[in-house]
Amino acid sequence: MRSLFWRILASFWLAIALVAGLSIGMGYLLNQDAWILSRHPAIRDFAQTWTQTFEEQGKDAAQALLEQRRRQFHVSIQVLNEAGDPVVPGTVPPRAEAMEARQRNDNRADDRPLPWRRLAAEYTSPTSGDTYLLIYRIPFPELDEWRKHSLFWPLSALAISLVVLTLFSLLVTLSITRPLNRLRGAVHDLGQASYQQNSLAQLANRRDEFGVLATDFNRMGSRLQSLIGSQRQLLRDVSHELRSPLARLRIALALAERAEAQQREALWPRLTRECDRLEDLISEILALARVDAEHASAETVDINMLLGGVRKDAQLSAADIDVRVDAQPGLTLLGWPTLVERAVDNLLRNALRFSPADRPVEINARLHNGQIEIAVRDHGPGVPPEHLAQLGEPFFRAPGQTSAGHGLGLAIARRAAERHGGSLQLSNHPAGGFVAKLELPLEPRPGV
């Protein structure tokens, strides 16, 4: 992953290094004698040239070289030996020596500064080993003129560095603000319910933090759209399912109003039955809604104890059907006990409705591949294979079913499994009957 953190850090580190380097260089250039000695055309490499000329061609040639530099650059040069005596007469006018001597010997405060800058540098001959002291006297007008031209390259380097820093800052700013603007647009679209799942596809291809964020946002948007769609479908299904018992109640009430007293007494059981059906339907709808609204903290769930309690409750309502539990000892997970119990209870009651009285309902629980599997099997007719994929959707019932129910039991179990980050697998058993298997992780997975 090309981390955005390292990209920004490297950009600013390089910018700081450039500014620091140029600042140090400018300070060195503007005020150091060494800079003048190494850069001024009259002085640069002069010591080596003069020494070589003096040792190979003699004093006259060396003196001529000093005169040539004075005429060309207006720089007076004097060369002293180790004893402090002039090696050649040099190019220093007697008046200049007198002025320097007077300034050294006179400490009066009103002395005017000398009209030149005096620089000195030692040079040791690699051939003879003799050391020479070269004294340069550069007039200030000449030095100021040279500085104007010599500052061109440092100032140019500073201008170039500022341009580079500006480009770096622009690129870093664009690399941050453009993805943020696209994410902001996606958030706005999501709030307006007009979000398109592929709107951040290009941003999700990036291999940095923005790419990871865009991928997670796409996943979240898809999940939210799916939830919104399922809620809308649920509302449509609920309104449809509630309309039937309400219509029957309305008809029964209309008949009771017109009936004689004796006939009205016969209608009360029907009204009571329709009210009970309506109450059961509303209870199951609320149970389905509470699965998604569960916000309590996860806690340890003892699967063995939970299965024992569910089996005991189920046997009270269906005493003629045997319920067998085969659970691996010590099964526990971190989750929501109420949801797990409701899911297993719905699966068990669904199996009891379809299983014949002479065949048991089997519950098996085991730890497999890092998750707990709870399978409930009946020995009923099963479900046509073409309808298995639709089982678990709210209010869906396979064609041909005559037992009571509203098609919410499997939907509640599936939502409970998904709330834990697991799943509900539905299938027909090869030896006959129907199998509903809950797959629950040992801990709720992130994002559920």
Image (tube, rainbow, N blue to C red):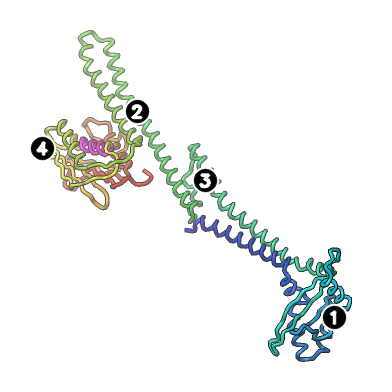
Q: Which mark is residue 91?
A: 1
Q: Amino acid at mark 3?
A: Leu
| Label 4 or label 1, whichever comes before in sequence order | 1
Considering only order in the chain, which callout, 3 or 2, is on the residue closer to the N terminus?
3
Instruction: Tell us which disc is closer to us: 1 or 2.
Output: 1
Q: Position of residue 241 (x, y in %)?
A: 32, 28
**In the image, which disc is placed on residue 240?**
2
Front of the two marks 2 and 4: 4
Q: CA distance from mark 1 to mark 2?
A: 115 Å
| Res. 398 visible in picture | no
Q: Residue at x 69, y 67 (%)?
A: 28
For the residues carrying marks 1 and 3, which lies nearer the camera in this image? 1
Kindly indicate the quadrant of the structure image that contains residue 324.
Answer: top left
Amino acid beneath label 2: His
Image vertical order of residue 126 relative to residue 303, above or below: below
Image height of 383 relative to 29, above or below = above
User: What range is drawn magenta here?
Assistant: 339-350
Q: What residue would you read off at disc 3?
A: 183
Identity of the amino acid at label 1?
Thr
Tell me where residue 178 appears, x and y as whole percent.
57, 49
Question: Disc 2 versus disc 4: distance between alpha carbons?
Answer: 37 Å
Give me the C-alpha separation between circle 3 and circle 4: 61 Å
Q: Quadrant of residue 312?
A: top left
Residue 8, compared with residue 362, is above or below; it is: below
